[in-house]
Image (cartoon, helix red, strand yellow):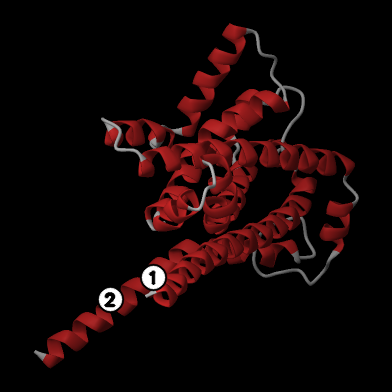
Amino acid sequence: MTAARGLLRHGLTVYAVCYLSFLYVPLFLLPLFSFNDSIFIAFPLSGFTTKWYVQMFQDDAMHRALWNTVKVGVMASLVSTILGLFAARALTRYAMPGRSVVLGFATLPLFIPDIVLGISLLILMTSVGIPLSLVSVALGHVMLCLPFAIAVLLSRFEGFDRSYEEASLDLGENGWMTFWRVTFPLVLPGIVSSLLLTFIVSFDDFLIAFFLSGTEPTLPVYIWAQLRFPFQLPGVLALGAAILLGSCTVVVIAEWIRSWGVKGETHSHIAGI
């Protein structure tokens, strides 16, 4: 029995290593080739250089595309988090009929292929006369980001102790001031986590932005356009490495803030007991 358990543990370890390697080794190749002194992506490496990063910082078109992406991401993350906050509060506070159906419809964009969603939004925008611009991209990204915001904020509200709100109401505060003085500070870590996560989702999206951006490309659309020119590829690799580092940092911060909020609430429960 002990030998069988050891063999099983060894097999699971090998599987975990192979699985993680399959996921992350290609990501490590991106920054590796961004320092390669050649426009060709091939081994052996020609040498070490940082000129592609210098080229990246000197590309004005890339900077405009990056600024477009930041504006869209900020707009989409703010709107989707606000809507997700209201939805999560309603779904957890009130015993509404068909709660699971409402939650299923709210998370439906997670299961629709992005290309189908992008084409559908393009048809909708052109049908109602909304011009293709950064505004239309932001509207599409709100639909894409809203399920993520709801998922993050639902987990926060489901662990929320309503006795704090009841105590505030017993002390004479109205519902609105109770929300701002009691509920909002307690769910703030979830709100910040939702803002960061939805910003990354919007920042990384290509298909919806491709269909809805018009003449104002976002950064993923700009990168896709540059891939047609081999001499631009090293600069794109440098940009991809920078985005990879930034995305990982933001996701880690978002998860840390969410975990910190959960631990803080746990400690407050223990102190109350």
Disc 1 target residue: 18
Structural distance between the alpha carbons of marks 1 and 2: 10 Å
Left-right relation of 49 to 212: right
- Residue 22 against residue 130 in the figure, above or below: below
List x then y, in percent, for residue 182.
54, 54
| Nearer to the camera, 192 or 144 | 192
List x then y, in percent, for residue 70.
74, 43
**Quadrant assignment, res 44:** bottom right
Q: Residue at x 20, y 85 (%)?
A: 7
List x then y, in percent, for residue 27.
57, 62
Q: Residue at x 65, y 28 (%)?
A: 137
Left-right relation of 222 to 87: right
Point out which mark residue 12 bears.
Answer: 2
Q: Secondary structure at mark 1?
A: helix
Q: Residue furthest bottom?
A: 2
| Nearer to the camera, 232 or 169 | 169
Q: Quadrant of the C terminus?
A: bottom left
- Residue 28 against residue 190 in the figure, above or below: below
Q: Around disc 1, counting alpha carbons within 10 Å, would you say few (fewer than 14), some (14 to 19), or many (20 or more)? A: few
**Quadrant assignment, res 246:** bottom right
Q: Residue at x 45, y 57 (%)?
A: 164
List x then y, in percent, for residue 253.
61, 64
Q: Around disc 2, counting alpha carbons within 10 Å, would you say few (fewer than 14), some (14 to 19), or many (20 or more)? A: few
Left-right relation of 87 to 61: left
